Amino acid sequence: MLVIRFMRHDQPRRMHGFTLVELMTVAVIVIISLSMAAPTLRQFVQGQKVRAISQDLMSDLLLARSEALTRHAVVAVTPVNGDWSSGWSVTAAGQVLASRTGEAGSAALDGAPTAITFGVFGRVQAPLGRIRMTVRPPVSDASAQQQRCVELDSAGRPRTSYGPCVSSASRRR
């Protein structure tokens, strides 16, 4: 049996989809949310770059110390073109053991020596004493939470810590 239904005029039609006003409202809310999150996201990315560079530097310092002990030879960690932020290489007897290239403008290293040399017993030969390098974003107004300290003691053991490097005299205060 065939049944034909007619729509009555007093019944509302069912609407499918969204109206233009609803779509524009959602778009405005999304744009406002993203504009508020953008500065925080930028700081997060800068902090992660600094963290990665400091971990890479510490890893290569450990490699240099280990290779000096294993090869019973002098191993040097030197910056690329005299600039640590451009990268560095680990060399022993003219052979490159490892090298890192830095992304231009990704981080700055404060207090870094011209080169770090490990002797045959894995101790730092040059420069003498404790080495402290602060890895920070290239912007000068970086917060202490975005900075990392890479430290080498005279025995050649590297370590990293949060914040800028602090001299031993100011630690005693």
Image (spheres, rainbow, N blue to C red):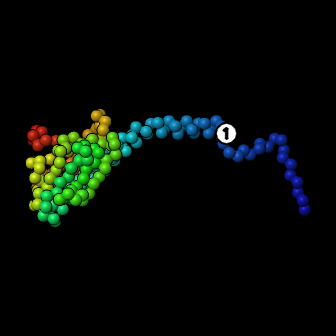
Dividing the picture into quadrants, the one containing residue 86 is: top left
Position of the N terminus by quadrant? bottom right
Observer-nearest of 137 and 120: 120
Task: Give the image location of residue 75, x and y in percent.
Answer: 16, 57
Say whether residue 162 is left or right of residue 170: right
Image point (67%, 39%), residue name: 19
Task: Give the image location of residue 152, x and y in percent.
Answer: 15, 51
Amino acid on which the number 1 mark rests in the picture: Thr
Dividing the picture into quadrants, the one containing residue 83 is: top left
Image point (10%, 61%), residue name: 121
In the image, is residue 159 above or below residue 139? below
In the image, is residue 58 above or below residue 27? below
Image point (30%, 38%), residue name: 138
List the residue tagged with mark 1.
Answer: 19
Residue 36 seen by the camera: yes
Secondary structure beneath dot 1 equals: loop
Task: Give the image location of residue 157, x and y in percent.
Answer: 15, 55
Label 1 environment density (alpha carbons within 10 Å; few <14, some 14–19, many ≥20): few
Which residue is farthest front? 94
- Label total for image: 1
Dividing the picture into quadrants, the one containing residue 119 is: bottom left
Task: Give the image location of residue 172, x and y in percent.
Answer: 9, 41
